[in-house]
Image (cartoon, grey):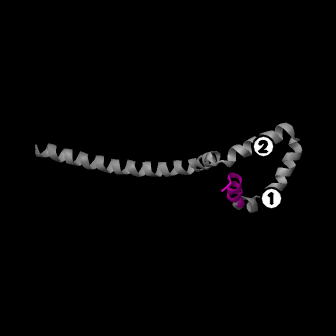
Amino acid sequence: MNAHGELLAARRELLLARSERLRLELGDDSAALALRFRLADRIVARARSGLAPVLLVGGAALVLFGRPRRILRMALKLLLFWPVIRPLLPHFADLWRGR
């Protein structure tokens, strides 16, 4: 009976060590998944904001009724100013919503 108890205790220790190892691996995997889904979370957050539908409708209207090449050239030129424009976007959104 004593040998059986020792065998069970040894098995329990092995299972506890395995459980701890698997917990650590799961933590590492969840951190990696969080990094992978960070971009998706940001896109969803932007889509839920009030400004995203306005931008999508405006962009679709420009492409449908404007000249796509000219719009593309203008967008590429405006891309140079993106670091300046980006911090101001929340203020423009607040103005648009009337806050």
Q: Residue at x 75, y 62 (%)?
A: 84
Label 2's element? helix
Q: Position of residue 2 (x, y in %)?
A: 11, 46
Q: Which residue is mark 2?
A: 59
> Going by the picture, which residue comes out furthest to the top?
64
Q: Residue at x 34, y 48 (%)?
A: 19
Extent of the magenta region: 88-99
Is 7 displayed left or right of 58 in the figure?
A: left
Q: Which residue is mark 1?
A: 80
Q: Is the N terminus in the top left, top right, bottom left or bottom right quadrant?
A: top left
Q: Nearer the viewer, mark 2 or mark 1?
A: 2
**Of label 2 and label 1, which has the lower sequence position?**
2
Taking 71 as reference, is 99 above or below it?
below
Q: Is residue 94 magenta?
A: yes
Which residue type carries mark 1?
Leu
User: Quadrant location of residue 66?
Assistant: top right
**Badge 1, how many Cα within 10 Å: few under 14, some, many 20+?**
few
Which residue type carries mark 2?
Gly
- In front: 69, or 87? 87
